[in-house]
Image (spheres, rainbow, N blue to C red):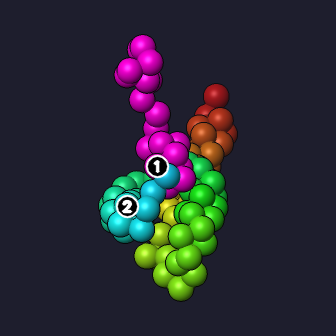
Amino acid sequence: MNDKNPEPKPFHKSIVDFIAEADEDCMVAAAGIIKRTSVPDDHEVIKQAWQQRLLRLGQREVDYGVPAYLDGQQAKAEEKKAAAKQAAAELDLGPS
């Protein structure tokens, strides 16, 4: 792709870029989008960007539930990876 149309990034990477530039209204909108999305990776990176941006905006009291949601998404991702690892191990232990 050219400079006018950069290669698309996965959601969990582009949301960090968006958060860095977001004003208060955009943070509210981003919270709604994040909490409607399955976030597969970079949970801690997103959480850190989220919390830093809120601090810069002077919003110390409200996090819109995003960190807790990301913690839940991270737990689900870890469970999914563990289940896949277990399934692979069971296949390897199967009859020869």
Instruction: Please say if 90 is above or below 55.
Output: above
Which quarter of the image is occupied by the C terminus?
top right
Q: Are marks 1 and 2 in contact (CB under 8 Å)?
A: yes
Q: Is residue 4 magenta?
A: yes
Residue closest to the far top: 2
Q: Residues within 10 Å of mark 1 (few under 14, many from 20)?
A: some
Whether residue 66 is visible here, answered yes or no, is: yes
Residue at the spot 41% in from the left edge and 14% down from the top edge: 1
Q: Relative to the observer, which residue lies in front, 46 or 52?
A: 52
**The disc labelled 2 sits on which kind of residue?**
Cys
Residue in front for this viewpoint, 82 or 25: 25
Q: Which residues are magenta?
A: 1-20
Q: Which circle's residue, 1 or 2, is located before the other in the chain?
A: 1
Q: Give the answer, above or below, for where 90 lies relative to 25.
A: above
**Above or below — where is 95 with respect to 65?**
above
In-image side of 93 versus 70 (left or right) = right
Does any portion of residue 79 appear in the rendered image? no
Judging by the rendered image, the residue that carries numbered circle 1 is 18
- Residue placed under numbered mark 2 in the picture: 26
Point 37% across, 22% down: residue: 5
Q: Name the secondary structure under disc 2.
A: helix
How much space separates mark 1 and mark 2, taking CA atoms?
9 Å
Q: Residues within 10 Å of mark 2 (few under 14, many from 20)?
A: few
Extreme residue in the bottom direction? 61
Q: Position of residue 21 (x, y in %)?
A: 49, 52
Residue 81 or residue 94, whichever sits in front:
81
Q: Residue at x 37, y 61 (%)?
A: 26
Name the amino acid type tagged 1: Phe
